[in-house]
Image (spheres, rainbow, N blue to C red):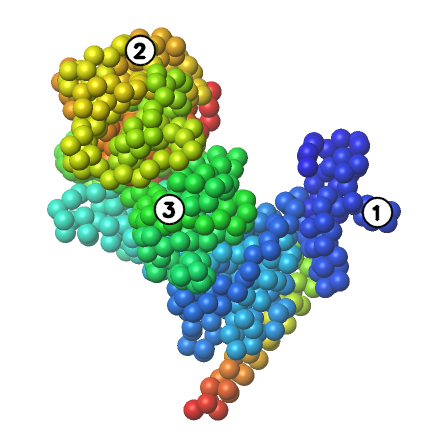
Amino acid sequence: MLRKRFDLSDVKCSHCQLAFDASVMIEEGDALYFCCKGCQGVYHLLKDDGLDAFYDKMRNNTIAPPLENDKDSSSFDLESFKQRYIKTDADGFSRVDLVIEGIHCAACVWLNEKILNETEGVLEVSINFSNNKAKLVWDEETVKLSTLIEKIRLVGYNAYPYDFNEVSQQSIDAKRDYISRMGVAIFGVLNIMMIDVAKYAGYFLGMDREVLHMIHLVEFLFSTMVLFYSGWIFFKGAYYGLKNKIINMDLLVSGGATITYFYSISILFGAKGQSYFDSVAMIILFVLVGKYLEVLGKKSAMDSMDRMKSQIPLEATIIENGIKKVVTLDEVKVGDIIEVKNGEKASVDGVSIVKLATFDESSLSGESLPVEKQKGDNIFSGTINTGNVMRYEATKNYANSSLSTMMNLLEDALASKPKIEETTNRLSQHFSLSIIILAMLSFVGWYFYSGDFEKSLIITISVIVIACPCALALATPIASLVGISWATQKGLLFKEAKFIETFAKATTVVVDKTGTITKGKLTVKHQSKVLNEEHLALLYALLSGSTHPVSQSIKKYLETTAKEIDALNLENIEQVSAQGMLAHYGKIQLLGGNAKLMQRHGIMVEKSAYTVYHFAIDGVLISSFELEDSIKENVTELIAYFKKEKIDLFMATGDSKEVASRLANEVGIESFMSQMSPLDKANKIKALKEQGEIVVMVGDGINDTLALSYADIAIVMGSGADVALAMSDVVVQNNSLLGIKDAFVISRRTYKFIKQNLLISLLYNVITIPLAIAGYVMPLFAALSMSVSSLLVVGNSMRIKIKK
Amino acid sequence: MTEVLQLELIVGIVVTFILILIFVLSAKKGNFDDQKKMMDGMLFDSPDDLRSAVKQEAKQEEMKKKKRESKELDK
């Protein structure tokens, strides 16, 4: 259905409120219009159940039409499901945590909660609007979970379970802890500020000593609460820092605030001077806000991980001796035949055993169009079968399958720190120590210069607070977080955040030809001589021993052109790296490969500008196959980008000089290296590195792994061999060459912002520290300006995603 | 005058600390986990929603009571 923007000829759907052309709407009476039968059904269901308040709550929001879901929900009642996701509380009620798909607004939350709450047997349901997570507590003896899921599906939403574990609980507890500490700090600061109005008014207009004492007393109570309750985390951080012999920013914050606090107490008990209880509370509050933002960032990363994890299917249907059997994911073994119905997800990786199937691989690659899968093609876990029921053979167990691996990589990436961050952390430790020394020197200097203890102490506090390296410590992680999440949206998986820095500094890119520049799907363009039955069977047997794309293409070609091929078993099969294969059939020696292999065995062959596979028996050339590989889309755009950014580009291939040269001319690559063995490629990268270049290698095959391991950054296409994926630093999940360009753009932009952030924080310190030492900054303004510097860094990082 | 001020302050501080304690306990219990939903509820919840919430609480109590009773019977 074609959706258009709202204009005069459009009418709004009575359920989802989306506007469509009047001609495509289902009309019902005078005032009801529906964009689809789903909306019509849900509308009437809500009306009948008296839930039409939903439409009032929607106000001006629109929602997506109901999700079509005819999936069987009985899997929610399986024992394996119960064991994995359902917990029983002390009262005997069951609890499950769900991710509700299709929630758009507060009305959606209201509707789902309402419909579940009104069901007999539901004790509690709470849906979190910001992350679409729901907690459902019900009595299993009264109602089955599958019935509750059906209810959700009936009104056009869908629900997946997610594993609510200790880590999830910890992140929730951390957020709650910060909310309560921050709430108390805000409350304390607001009250102190209110009282301060009276205090400062009295400062100028005169005030009774007794009243001033009362004001100090109230300020003392509030600031004590803020310092020791809200600021407790800084004391804890400082303690652990000192225990590990590290002077961290927590020590600066807690130290600065505590000195101010005790000084102010001395004023409260009669010493001469001004109290600074207000500064104590504000220092804690401002820094706490910065820390809370960090906690929120981590929590949101956890939520997106949970959402991804909720996409994992619960079980698989395997075919055992012709009988269907539903098993849990952990029970699926390599070699099992798995059946996937339309709309179901593949549970583990495998290869298709049916002629044709279509899969939606958007969860892995971001590519929205369904991908056709032929017999022998790879099926990836987490992808959805969009065609008819199909079967495939498992090649991996669940733990080693794509979805599980990708999630582990993402978790690792979020946990890792870029090199620049490690350096910054070390720097901020030295920095903190220097500030403490500087503050002490300021105190001694001012005390001897002015003889005023109070002034010297206040200056010391200001120096400590203003120099707190919060912005410095935030500069890199916050920018990396924004960069990595942007890359993930573009289908790029940075295995570790530290690769952003190296990527941004890269000067040279070495690309593999087959599978990277070209699609790697070769087709036979020309065959020099038709083979007899015996030769055909020998060649077919030889080709069957190799997974190289050239061998596979010729094998496919023979299967389609020959009526029947005898199956033969070869002996002594030997792979000759980047050249071909050698084998024996009885006493007959078989050779299959490129011109280099033939020449090594004294067979003369003609040169060609195409990829040529020669087949020889006992030193005699039998036939040659000319193959053509189609070039990937966007090659020219990528090359133009490299030229613009002055990044050197080399194409490395095991193919002949002619083939490499023809392709290089066609796409505009100036430097290429042909007839490269895996070792040659690795040596070339080593040589480039010795020349001081920072090298990025792009590859996809097993033959590239050595070179990938030598490179500073290894990029592998998502469809690449497992070993190559394991060796990679960055995975381009959608296999698009533009992914490489995106990786450069994102990492260079992120690194630029990291440097900007560091500059902001350093400039701030360079300007403010001398001012504080000179006595121009009050502790209150020191705290405020320190927080402003942190906010500047966070705000600047948010600009990373905003493209010029 | 000062005595009145002192008395007001004492009462105010006691009330304040009770309210803070309630806030801390409710935050730890998860009442502020979903700020968006909370704000929306404050602005747009109708008397019907409040009635439903009260009904739901009564239903919860009743369910818990029934569960306890059936547990005791089992014993």
**Residue at 45% over, 63% down:** A323
Give the residue pinned by disc 1. A31
Q: Is residue A641 above or below residue A11?
A: above
Above or below, comparing residue A221 to residue A564 in the picture: below
Q: Are marks 2 and 1 in contact (CB under 8 Å)?
A: no
Label 1's element?
loop
Residue holding disc 3 = A350
Residue linked to disc 2: A608
Looking at the picture, does residue A188 appear above or below residue A764?
Answer: below
Q: Amino acid at mark 1?
A: Ala
- Sequence-wise first label, 2 or 1: 1
The Cα–Cα distance between marks 3 and 1, rounded to whole angstroms, is 52 Å
- Nearer mark to the viewer, of 2 and 3: 2
Alpha-carbon span between mark 2 and mark 3: 37 Å
Front-most of A162 and A738? Answer: A738
- Residue at 40% across, 61% down: A321
Residue A571, position as x, y percentages in the image: 18, 37
Q: Answer with mark 2 or mark 3, whichever residue precedes in sequence.
A: 3
Q: Is any part of residue A712 visible from this angle?
A: no
- Tell me the mark number nearer the camera, choosing from 2 and 1: 2
In this view, A552 is above or below A289: above
Query: Do the residues under discs 3 and 1 have CB atoms within 8 angstroms?
Result: no
A565 sits left or right of A429 in the view: right
Q: Who comes first in sequence, dot 3 or dot 1?
A: 1
